[in-house]
Image (spheres, helix red, strand yellow):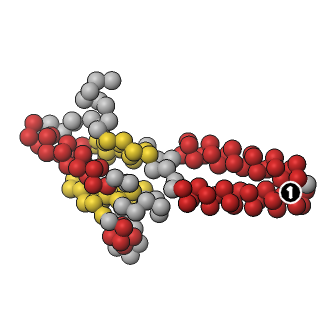
Amino acid sequence: MSSTQQPRYSERLWPSVGVVLFCLLMIVSMGIAIGYMYGFGLGLAATIAITAVSTLGTILYTVSVVVDHRGFHVGNALLPWQAVGPVSVLDQSTTARARSANAHPAAYFNVRSWIKESVIVQVNDVNDPHPYWHVSSRNAQRLASVIESHQTSASHSGADNG
């Protein structure tokens, strides 16, 4: 991979410690209930199995946010550079309002409740059904800066592809 193709920004939206602890508490509770009904061995086996499946699911399905030469990626979705519009950084209270009462019903959302900040990236493509992307980020200011710096360098060079 050349230096122009390496991601300029990359982040995985892992669950917070509180979410993980809550899930573990629920798994152990389920194991205790199964153990009470069907015996200790089955309860322990169920706890181990549910923990393994939950861990694997978390690893496989945790969303990545990436900015690279092709555009802005969130999970499997790609917003190419020619469609990336202005970026807004939202703090905790603005993020909460933007994903509830002030949300556009056609917007693309990838928001995690355990992540306090987010960005909104306007979509500059009349054929795209989403007016904007609303995406959680633990480092929203840096994400917005990387996107804006690419837009600035692309506009100065006259290129849309990074």
Q: Percent position (x, y) of residue 65?
A: 38, 46
Asked whether residue 127 appears in the rendered view, the answer is no
**Which picture quadrant has residue 140?**
bottom left
Give residue 29's position: percent from left, percent from top: 75, 61
Q: Is residue 117 above or below residue 7?
A: below
Q: Which residue is mark 1?
A: 35
Q: From where the camera sits, is residue 149 visible?
A: yes
Question: Where is residue 141, by image quadrant?
Answer: bottom left
Q: Which residue sits furthest top?
A: 1
Residue sitting at x 22%, y 53%: 85
Q: Position of residue 35 (x, y in %)?
A: 86, 57
At a point 54% along the width and 46% down the height, the residue shown is 61
Give whichever of 39, 160 is nearer the camera.
39
Q: Amino acid at mark 1?
A: Gly
Q: Residues within 10 Å of mark 1 (few under 14, many from 20)?
A: some
Task: Give the quadrant of the C terminus.
Answer: top left
Nearer to me, 146 or 16: 16
Q: Residue at x 55, y 60 (%)?
A: 18
- As drawn, is 80 to the left or to the right of 96? left
Q: Residue lying furthest bottom in this view?
A: 101
Q: Position of residue 86 (x, y in %)?
A: 21, 56
Work out whether 43 lies above or below 90: above
Q: Name the secondary structure under disc 1.
A: helix
Q: In the rendered view, does 17 fall on the left or right side of 145?
A: right
Number of numbered labels in the structure image: 1
Q: Is residue 113 left or right of residue 144?
A: right
**Image quarter (top left, top right, bottom left or bottom right) of the N terminus:** top left
Point 83% across, 53% down: residue: 43
